[in-house]
Amino acid sequence: MTSSAFLQDFHHVATIGATANNGVDRQAATPDDAKTRDWFGQWIHDAGWQLQVDGIGNMFGLLEWTPGAPFILIGSHLDSQPLGGRFDGAYGVIAALHAARAIDLEVRAAGTAPRFNLAVVNWFNEEGGRFAPSVMGSSVFTGLFDREQMLSVKDLQGVSVREALEGIGYLGTDAGPKAAGYAEIHIEQGRILEREGISIGLVDSSWYTQKLDIEVLGEQSHTGATAMADRHDALVAASKIILMVHEVTKDFDEEALVSSVGQLTLEPNSPIVVARRVHLVADLRSGDPEIVNAARARLLADIGKLAAEHDIKVNVKDFDIRPIRRFPEAGLELSAKIAANLGLSSRRIQTMAGHDSVAMNTAVPSVMLFIPSVDGVSHCEREFTSDEDMVTGVQMLTGVARELVQGELA
């Protein structure tokens, strides 16, 4: 592997769906997502590997040295958030391609096949920006989500996952490889590594995640002719709920809980009509499930009072609950040893965000690695990681994958 070849590929992919301020917009199963998929498929073809696409749009580049043996999977995702960053996900896929090529050259030079084969994966719809829930492709692959249910999920325009994948030509029929392990490298999306001057984060666990699907039902009326006292404004009530979700973090220790409302739709969405319905999704996350449950209970109580005060109806449903997942101790120890051998500083770290590795870790031993994010920002055009840190991460991933194909975590 040469660092220049990796950087050339990374910066090329960043031009696909590029935005005005150095970000990318490649939401799942859009034309620009298709272009990155075409690029990935061509890369696999040029390398002489086998390409498979499964029934939820996951793409696999297979290096089969030992016929019939299971595969170590390495990779991430090429889709992005709307107006997202160019590093999130794409870095892990491109790093995996170059790590796999380096290991392939080593295996062929040695003339002896390792215990496991190797596959590079581009997971479908990790971001969940267009189709909820997120981490969709890897969750279907591991059996956490039902494939038919996910294919029926629709975006805000009413287009289903099935229709979108068929539309870009990536609703595959392959079963995908039998996995024996997984490794993924990703930008941290936080500021711990940068703040402490550490090169590699070794992810030991994921945060507990709880989402609330909230429907606020008022009454449609005229914004000019209806007296204020006679209004049942769903948007006013929803705006107060949004503030509740933000303020509930103050009931707990600093940084113990994060919360947000990232998506809101309203009906009929006319400038001269009082809103009759607002739909929003609240997101609560913490390293302690009890904190999330306490925040949920507080919100449910406050929302109940609000509904009575405004004389409206609010329906709240639990949505996309994800427990804490702990990564294998053996993988953490192995990764720490590899980092030390490369002369890299490392530390254990939690992931507050969801990743494909969290889903994969439910099925096979998995390793999750982080590299620093400048200012800790992500899911925006300002997201940034240096070329130097990216190249260091490729070396780290290569070292981990080299050990995994030999069966070190089996």
Image (cartoon, rainbow, N blue to C red):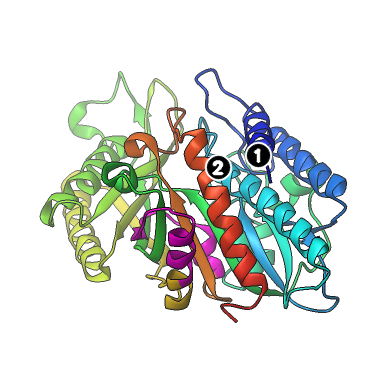
Q: Quadrant of residue 207?
A: bottom left
The first of marks 2 and 1 along the sequence is 1
Crowd around label 2: few <14 · some 14–19 · many ≥20 (10 Å): some
Q: Which mark is residue 233?
A: none
Relative image position of residue 110 (x, y in whole percent): 79, 66
Q: Residue at x 46, y 36 (%)?
A: 385
Q: Are marks 2 and 1 in contact (CB under 8 Å)?
A: yes
- In magenta stretch: residue 355: yes
| Amino acid at dot 1 | Phe
Q: What secondary structure is found at the residue carrying circle 2?
A: helix
Q: Quadrant of residue 24?
A: top right
The residue that label 2 is drawn on is 391
Q: Residue at x 58, y 76 (%)?
A: 364
Give the extent of the magenta segment: 334-360
Q: Which mark is residue 6?
A: 1
In front here: 69 or 146? 69
Tally of numbered discs: 2
